[in-house]
Amino acid sequence: MTNEEYANLLLPAITKTIEDYKDIYPKRNLKEGAIVTRYAPSPTGYVHMGALYAAFIASKMAKQTEGVFFLRIEDTDKKREIEDGVSGIINDLNNYGIAIDEGVLNENEELGNYGPYIQSKRKEIYQSFAKYLIINDLAYPCFCSEDDLNNIRKEQENLKERIGYYGKWARDRYLSKDDIIKKINNNEKYVIRLKSPGNFENKVIYDDLVKGKLELPENDMDIVIIKGDGLPTYHFAHLVDDYLMQTTHVIRGDEWLSSVPIHLQLFKVFGFKAPKYAHIAPLLKEENGNRRKLSKRKDPEAAISFYHSKGIPTQAVLLYLCTVANSNFEMWLDQNKDKTIEDFKMEFKKISSSGSLFDLEKLLNISRNYISKLEASEVYDKALEYSKIYDLEMFDLLTKYKDYSIAIFNIERVQKKPRKDLAMFSDIRKENWYMYDELFENITYHFDKINDMVEIKKILNLYLEKYYNEADDKETWFNRIKDLSQTLGYAKEVKEYKENPDNFKGHCGDISMVLRVVLTTLQQTPDLYDIMQLLGSERIEERINKVGD
RNA sequence: GGCCCGUUGGUGAAGUGGUUAACACAUAACCCUCUCAAGGUUACAUUCACGAGUCCAAAUCUCGUACGGGCUACCA
């Protein structure tokens, strides 16, 4: 029996050869320096911050070199797959404005000439590549059961030998062709393993784009390349896909670092040029003084949806991820205030090789700065979008009072250093609720120094009667409060009061605090004049009369 | 167990043989101010996990130790 006949017995349905596929996938026409990257998630859960981080870097790198960024779905583990996994990934990418040049667009559509971009649809391609290895005696069927494998492991543990399916432990590597043919005719289940040409004593040296020069032991494991269900393992799919799709730079989490010798060997066995690798350290979380990878199971903040539900702008998340990736980004942005992430030149070398704690505080700070630079109408649009999903009552109010709401968001916004009190759109309710009569119910006032109701009423009545005029500009408005203060025995100026506290009942600040609390119930608010202008005289009177009822 | 990777302030970090060890977040104090937010000023690592070595000189180079992380699946 020839090698071809033998390979046909193992993979009878495969008719195309590697050469056929080389013709189907044309060479990419890229300009000098352009790189091809990808995001290749498994649809096993919703998108994780660490995955978004890697996807962001990959897309950014491709874009800034005018290369290609594509999305490939790695659904070779049918057991772990979840429903809507693929659409979840696509939606999240869209929400974050991470555009793909090629890949999966939705359940039934793809973009690009290098597909299919869903691995389960590429079964024959992988098998064709596996067939090539079988023909060349670089792969073989393995009939070991789970128990067989466990027994091998146990024996290795007892003998304190290195664990794995390699060398003399690779039981079925030494099966004769006749035995194999017999077993196959007998319908015995099998997987296909690589016949590894490696030696563990030898070192492979390679240069990681972020970790630098590395020396790893050569792979000598006869790893599974085609599983019992005919689908490839990650390693083999990586080889086939990234070869055919002509990925130049593989950007992935550093949990893959120790698999690099396998991957390098696979490329070598086929005589293909391996891509460059950039292994990104994970985002970490501190727990009981230890650091561990941010986990979607344990940490709510690991899921992208967490930020969505808080109303943290996607742009802010991207800005944060960009500073984590290249910490010089922050300073660069500070020096180039009119520029955006798009203009920034990200570098692999500047990506930290050690994992960093995910810093929500810092993210919120970035978010605050980001929101402060938006136009009031943009804040409105985003707040509307947010509340439509997460706060319907607020949504109705925003819709009902559109211009009024925009004016609220505009308070202290148009100035050289805009107000920064919103870090997320869920803060809007917390910060602005009192501006809406519908929410100004069942309230409790939090008075400060002046808390005697008799005095408070006196102040308010006098204010309404003689000192309040809606048409006043800010300066006259405040001067009148000062006049009122003086009339009632309070100091006109704070300084004046501080110099001789005994001469006064308090100062103008105490008087305006009364007004502030009456109108908003709070001691801390944005500019009172602006608030009063928006509230208008009718509502002001109403709220003043409401006190003490 | 084996093999890798990592370790600079509370956090993210700059730094690649000679620096006062940048910068940002956080924290604290003060200033400004009718409150808050913002802004301004200042403080915050005698020291770069620890121990040795090389060198006139080490956070930077070498070795060892400790601690943390990853991989060691017919999971990715």
Image (cartoon, rainbow, N blue to C red):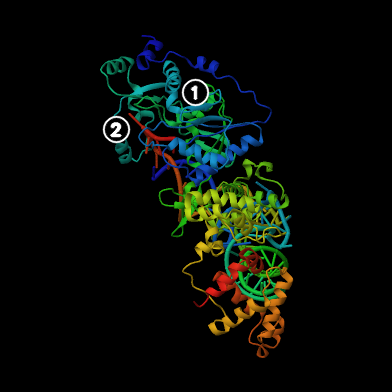
* Viewer-side residue, A135 vs A251: A251
Is B29 drawn above or below residue A433 in the view shown?
below
Q: Is residue A414 left or right of residue A136?
A: right
Q: Residues within 10 Å of mark 2 (few under 14, many from 20)?
A: few
Residue located at (64% from left, 69% from top)? A528
* Viewer-side residue, B15 vs A311: A311
Seen as rendered, the residue at the extreme top is A1
Q: What chain letter is assigned to the residue under label 1?
A: A
Is A327 drawn above or below residue A448 in the view shown?
above
Q: Is residue B46 left or right of residue A479?
A: left
Please tell me if label 1 and label 2 are on a single chain.
yes
Q: Quadrant of the N terminus of chain A?
A: top left
Question: To which residue does mark 1 refer?
Answer: A269
Residue located at (56% from left, 62% from top)? A432
Residue located at (46% from left, 14% from top)? A16
Question: To which residue does mark 2 refer?
Answer: A146
At label 2, the amino acid type is Glu
Q: Position of residue A439 (x, y in %)?
A: 50, 63
The answer to whether residue A391 is visible is no
Q: Secondary structure at mark 2?
A: helix
Seen as rendered, the residue at the extreme left is A186
